[in-house]
Image: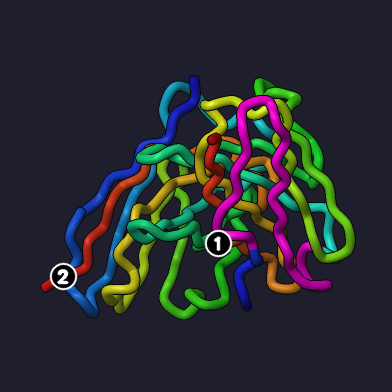
Amino acid sequence: QSALTQPPSASGSPGQSVTISCTGTSSDVGAYDYVSWYQQHPGKAPKLMIYEVNRRPSGVPDRFSGSKSGNTASLTVSGLQAEDEADYYCSSYAGTNNYVLFGGGTKLTVL
Amino acid sequence: QLQLQESGPGLVKPSETLSLTCAVSGGSFNSRSYYWGWIRQPPGKGLEWIGSIYYSGSTYYNPSLKRRVSISVDTSRTHLSLNLGSVAAADMAVYYCTFGVAIDAVDLWGHGTLVTVSS
């Protein structure tokens, strides 16, 4: 199985919005509404930001939102803040053999 | 507050078996269904899902690791184990213990433990 495809980097200025894409196939992202997004700061464990495509866990700011169209899921960060600078990973349930795929990660830089 | 803590050897020789344990502290899993598992991250690289065990005992593994990996839970459901056989340099990574109510959404992560593969 192949990893999900994410752009290696993204950037934006404080206050702006940035969208990170995550492309899979009709066997994973396109087949299930089980896409999650994680934020990881250097030296820290990842943190769940979005699950089931567009649901936010308690405590995650509503500046973070998720969506999906076909085989591509997206994470949008609105009103960028300095603390949003981190690596972001998408994941998707891949069904048939009950496993999970991750994207390669996107480094978000706040300019 | 529920916490996960990984433990195990930080150095494993090539071709040997990597064995890690994860202990839950600060409470117990209150969810009626949950997945307890492992995810790893090679230094400077991305995340890789290793596998999970459902609260019922069913196990699910990354197809690329399935032949070498085993995940189990003790009878008290307070310790999770990972065994990965025939390790090579590519298995060197930070190994995270994880918990979630869905197989794909990890709500809780351990701090991670670095495992180096070297003779």
Q: In which image quadrant can residue A5 be found?
A: bottom right
Tag 1: amino acid: Gly
Q: Closer to the camera, B96 or A67? A: A67
In the rendered view, does B38 fall on the left or right side of A24?
left
The answer to whether residue B110 shows anywhere in this view is no
- Dot 1: chain letter: A
Query: Which one is in front in this view, the residue at disc 2 or the one at disc 1?
Result: 1
Q: Residues within 10 Å of mark 1 (few under 14, many from 20)?
A: many
In the rendered view, does A55 fall on the left or right side of A15?
right
Tag 2: amino acid: Ser
Percent from the top left, x then y, of residue B42? 37, 61
Instruction: Please name the colour scheme applied to the rendered image.
Output: rainbow
Percent from the top left, x then y, of residue B6? 34, 43
The answer to whether residue B15 shows anywhere in this view is yes
Percent from the top left, x then y, of residue B51? 54, 61
Q: Closer to the camera, B16 or A84? A: A84
| Circle 2 SS class | loop
Percent from the top left, x then y, of residue A35? 74, 52
Q: Closer to the camera, B18 or B81? A: B18
What residue does disc 1 label? A104
Please report the residue visible at 63 percent of the width from the left and 78 percent of the height from the top.
Answer: A1
Please report the residue visible at 81 percent of the width from the left and 40 percent of the height from the top.
Answer: A54
Up-down relation of residue A47 to residue A105 (above or below)? above
Q: Which mark is residue B118?
A: 2
- Dot 2: chain letter: B
Q: Closer to the camera, B31 or A24? A: A24
Please report the residue visible at 48 percent of the width from the left and 74 percent of the height from the top.
Answer: B65
| The magenta segment | A6-29
Up-down relation of residue B97 to residue A77 (above or below)? below
Please report the residue visible at 74 percent of the width from the left and 68 percent of the height from the top.
Answer: A24
Q: Is residue A10 magenta?
A: yes
Up-down relation of residue B99 to residue B58 (above or below)? above
